[in-house]
Amino acid sequence: MSNRTFTNRIVILDTETTGLNPQDGHRIIEVGGVEMIKRRLTGQRFHAYINPNRIIDQGAIAVHGITNEFLKDKPFFEDIVEDFLAFIKDAELVIHNAPFDVGFLNHELSLLKHKMGTIEDYTEVFDTLAYARKKHPGQRNSLDALCKRYGIDNSHRELHGALLDSEILADVFILMTGGQSSLLDDIHSDLESSNSDMTAKEINTDRPALKVPQCSDEELLEHQVRLEEIEKTSNACLWLK
């Protein structure tokens, strides 16, 4: 399996929906994404609740807890689409089970009066579920399972949520794709940036003298006995030379 470095801009994304299939008329009700550059979260995020203009399936409410009443005063997808596309443009989308989310997003785009293309026109997509299945074949690779495998605390995740899940997926993504070369790249990048503005600093001669703990006579005796034992067994105790 190739070890990708993902050094460019990334958006970790998730959605929540009224049901399972956009072809059955189901819609997006929440979009959440967090930005990452050079494998580090920047603090930039996109989050919106969306009025789907239809009833949410009870099964879906049980998963994410978002109700029809809550969404009554929320904007429609057409109201947030320009800001959303601006946020993801020229980034690589990282999504867990990407065909599901991208399918819904493309369906929403197709319903707009002014056609705005598809998600693939704005960005590339990396599916962490497909990647996890290749890396951990025959194992459970849900987001919860991956959190457990990589030691990520997701105890605060009682219900699904687009922004919360994207933040959790960011942690999973870093650990799951964080090969040695990627980590070294980050270290080298840090060293280069820190070296570029390094200046010599004078030592403060007014600082207090360093405290040097002294060994007791008993500790010195124990140390000497230990060195002699090493010399007897190896005949090469450097500290006695």
Image (cartoon, helix red, strand yellow):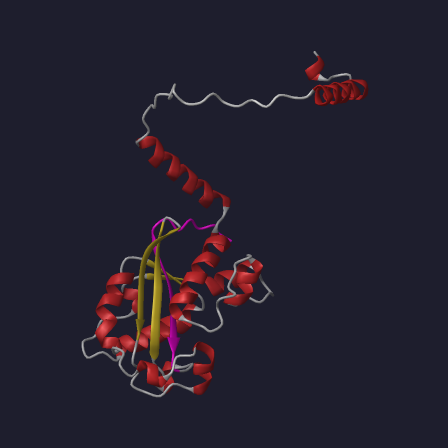
Q: Relative to the observer, which residue lies in front, 35 or 117?
A: 35
Q: Relative to the observer, which residue lies in front, 87 or 136?
A: 87
Q: Residue at x 22, y 68 (%)?
A: 82
Q: What x and y, as percent, mark residue 143?
A: 50, 66
Residue found at the far left of this picture? 114
Q: Relative to the observer, which residue lies in front, 118 or 237?
A: 237
Q: Residue at x 34, y 24 (%)?
A: 201
Q: What x and y, as percent, mark residue 218?
A: 73, 22
Asked if the stretch drawn in magenta spans residue 148, the answer is: no
Q: Residue at x 24, y 63 (%)?
A: 86
Using the rendered view, name the quadrant where residue 160 is placed: bottom left
Asked if the stretch drawn in magenta spans residue 4, the answer is: yes
Q: What x and y, as percent, mark residue 240?
A: 71, 14
- Placement of 151 over or under 50, stated as above or below: above
Q: How many labels does the image show?
A: 0
Q: Which residue is drawn at 22% across and 71% down?
A: 116
Residue found at the far top of this picture? 241
Q: What x and y, as percent, mark residue 1?
A: 51, 53
Q: In which quarter of the image is the C terminus?
A: top right
Can the viewer see residue 127 in this picture? no
Specify start and end residues of the magenta stretch as a single range: 1-18
Q: Relative to the observer, which residue lies in front, 89 or 153?
A: 153
- Placement of 13 over or under 67, stated as above or below: above
Can the viewer see residue 224 in this picture? yes
Using the rendered view, name the quadrant where residue 161 is placed: bottom left
- Placement of 216 over or under 50, stated as above or below: above
